[in-house]
Amino acid sequence: TRDAGKAIRQRALDNLDVWLELFEKGATERGATVLFAQTPAEINKLVLDIAARHGVRKIIKSKSMVSEESALDHAIEGAGLTVVETDLGEYILQINDYEPPSHIIGPALHKSKEEVAELFHRKHGTPKKDGIEELCLEARGILREHYLTADMGISGGNFFVAESGSVVLVTNEGNATLTTTLPKVHVAISGIEKIVPTLEDVATLMRLLPRSATGQSISNYVDLLTGPKGDGEFHGVDHMYFIIVDSG
């Protein structure tokens, strides 16, 4: 399976220009807007331009390594807007004065239960809790309010599918699903190397991704998002954007 995954990735990289154009064509035909960025400043400017275009005041974010590297949260706050991280680990780090993440999958892996309990007590103004389930429920309650009042959702992208113009998101908390479907605008940001040719290729790579990341055979949530919602569709966003990053 690893050999098959390597072959898929190499096939995409060998003709990256072709697959990028096919992705742009497929995504555009399905109502999304595809934008390209080369620098952290360009990423942040594009996001702020989109926010201004749609009158956005509050932004929620699923985990995104590219936006972590571009310091997008600081740019958003610098523009006078509100941004809330919804991945539990990222949320813990954000409310702790943007402490840097320590791990690509578990950003707050270095924090003890006691440290998180003290942090929540201090930042939320709630009685101190000592159970992990209680702490998760407290975060869930606070984040739920943000899901329901945000104007824009930002995500990364595990895969960009050329044949359908889709983004695939792989998570264990369900926060990406809410972040990318409840607000009126969704912006997916990832590198050009995340392009894969077909949905069949995604199926092969999905056999590798969770096993390599967390040791699971499959993650709890896999979102396949294609364009904004259509006529008569209840779920989904009104506006969908892709920011594809080539940082050299």
Image: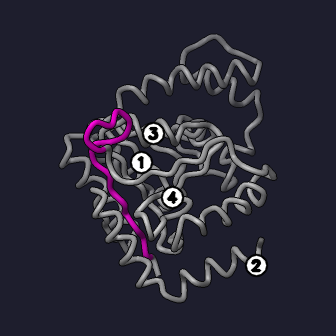
Q: Is residue 140 above or below residue 211?
A: above
- Read off the residue under disc 3: 179
- Is residue 46 among the parts visible in the rendering? no
N-terminal of the pair, mark 3 or mark 2, is 2
Quadrant into which the N terminus falls: bottom right
Q: Is residue 10 left or right of residue 133?
A: left
Mark 2 falls on what kind of element?
helix
Mark 2 or 4, which is nearer the eye?
2
Q: Which mark is residue 157?
A: 4
Res. 110 image quadrant: top right
| Separation (CA) of disc 4 from disc 1 | 10 Å
Residue 42's x, y, as percent?
32, 67
Q: Nearer the viewer, residue 223 or 63?
A: 223
Name which of mark 3 and mark 4 comes first in the sequence.
Answer: 4
Residue 177 image offset from top left, x and y in percent: 50, 40
- Magenta span contains residue 164: no
What residue span does the magenta drawing correspond to? Answer: 230-246
Q: Type of residue at label 1?
A: Ile
